[in-house]
Amino acid sequence: MKIIRVLLLFVLTWNVGAQEIRLKKGVIMTNLKVHDTLAESFSLYLPSSFNTNKAWPVLFVFNMKNKGKQALSMFVSAAEEQEYILAASNNVNDSLSLTKNLLISSRMFNRVYSILPIKKERVYTAGYKEGGKFASLIPAFIKGVSGVLSLSASVANREVLDVKKPYYFIGIVGKEDYSYSDMINNRKFLNKLKYPNQLLFHGRGEEWPQSTYFNSALEYFKLSAMAKNKEELDTFFVRETYQKNLMRINTLLKENKPLLAENILSQMLDVYRPLMNIDSVKEKRKYVKRSKLYRSRKNEENGILLKESFAIDDYNYFLEEDIASYNYNNLGWWKYQMEQITKLGNSSKLGEKQLGKRLDGYLNALLEDYIDLIKGADLVDEEALNLVYMIKTVVSPKEYKNYLNIISISAKNEDYGTALFYLEELLMNGYRNKEELYKLEHTALLRITPEFNETVAKYLKEARYEIMEE
């Protein structure tokens, strides 16, 4: 691999010095220091075509778990094809305050600007879930960001959007991702503000989409830059991407996917309008929207989204009420909801199947949020926490940690009946880690009872302690 040597001369208020660094093309470089006096680092990717003779667009990618390399890895293919530099902090974390994360990010931005020829008019941010939300906040606090690529996350704070200085928001979401309806509502909101945005759909759930979606997003950023004279107009590139999108639309129509085809046509109207004549796109979109199949699928989707909205409202309302009143009697209602979700997930209708996946994901995420909220309080409400764990066993019966937490908390409070009930539920659902079970916190007295050991022996063939018969 060819090595590029860059001689740096950086001047700070407390230090002046020169340093030589080695940058490799075509590989993700990790643990590059932001500054010698700071315990902060970042990961960096330079496309194989990189040279220092011109300025380059840069995409700053955010992972809120200190995993810069992991954040970049999914974007490498698109960055290579579209010729973008990638950079990601190894220190931003959702456990830190917004101010601290912004300062860390700002220092990384400045470091990248100081060592590489960056095209300042083409600076973008990106992220997945919480990383996407943070990426959408960056333009409000760090000047010069032209666009945000957000995966499975809407704009974090609508109040900080500046309609006089808008950035280009591109969202990507899976049709099985619980963020799906939220991302659709986010697009409607941005459209009302006349805020430039696109929303790309893929068929997966919360998994990362294929790299082709990142490629399309980076293409849109480049086309937008050309439309605003921030990038030299490349008519071949415009025509090539235009034809590629038309081919995708024709494929989707042949596959009887008019909603996805119409979405791309809508994107093309926004993206190509400043660059070329789009009358043919307008006509094709009208043709698609007039078709019986499109109208039928659109009505079906609207019905599903309405059903999803009602379900989500119910989950939020009843969960808050149940926790506030310690309503253990409502566990049956939650079991019924999961039966309905499972029924949807097993439906032969694609829209219902996707809805089932989304509702399952939403409910799990909602419960995890409540668990974090309760555990993060100065005084932990163990009864409320135990109830949420119980609901979690209904929603995710194969997540064994929830049963273990219930057993531990119940034993701590000498509620051995509840502890033994969830011990059997745990073992009935396939748990087999006897070593962990006999080390569980707060269960020292419970573990030596005949009932505990009889239950363990029933499912795991033998218990640790001998069962004494009277």
Image: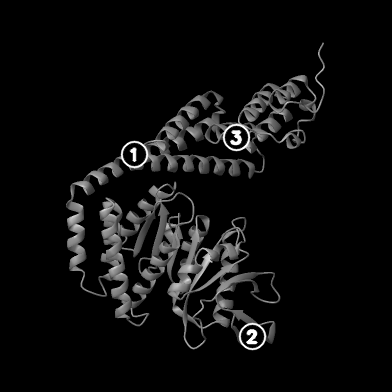
Q: Which residue is mark 1?
A: 349
Residue type pointed to by label 2: Val
Pointers 1 and 2 in contact (C-beta within 8 Å) = no
Quadrant in the picture for the N terminus: bottom right
The residue beneath circle 2 is: 11
- How many residues crowd around disc 2 within 10 Å: few (fewer than 14), some, or many (20 or more)? few
Whether residue 201 is visible here, answered yes or no, is yes
Figure quadrant of residue 351: top left
Does any portion of residue 142 appear in the rendered image? no
Residue marked by disc 3: 389
Do residues under tags 1 and 3 come within 8 Å of each other at their CB atoms? no
Q: Residue at x 58, y 82 (%)?
A: 115
Work out whether mark 1 precedes mark 2 in sequence or the reverse, and give the earlier one.
Answer: 2
Q: Marks 1 and 3, Cα distance to the nearest angstrom?
A: 32 Å
Q: Earlier in the sequence, mark 1 or mark 3?
A: 1
Identify the residue shown where x is 54% and y is 82%.
116
Instruction: Tell me where residue 244 sits by quadrant.
Output: bottom left
Q: Nearer the viewer, mark 1 or mark 2?
A: 1
398 displayed left or right of 175 = right
Query: Which quadrant: the C terminus?
Result: top right
17 shown above or below 255: below
Q: What's the amino acid at mark 3?
A: Tyr
Q: Amino acid at mark 1?
A: Lys
Q: Secondary structure at mark 1?
A: loop
Q: Residue shown at 68%/34% (left/top)? A: 432
Residue in front for this viewpoint, 343 or 188: 343
* Viewer-nearest residue: 343 or 55: 343
Label 3 sits on a secondary structure element that is helix
Say whether disc 2 or disc 3 marks the residue closer to the N-terminus: 2
The residue drawn where x is 76% and y is 36% is 435
Q: Nearer the viewer, residue 411 or 438?
A: 438
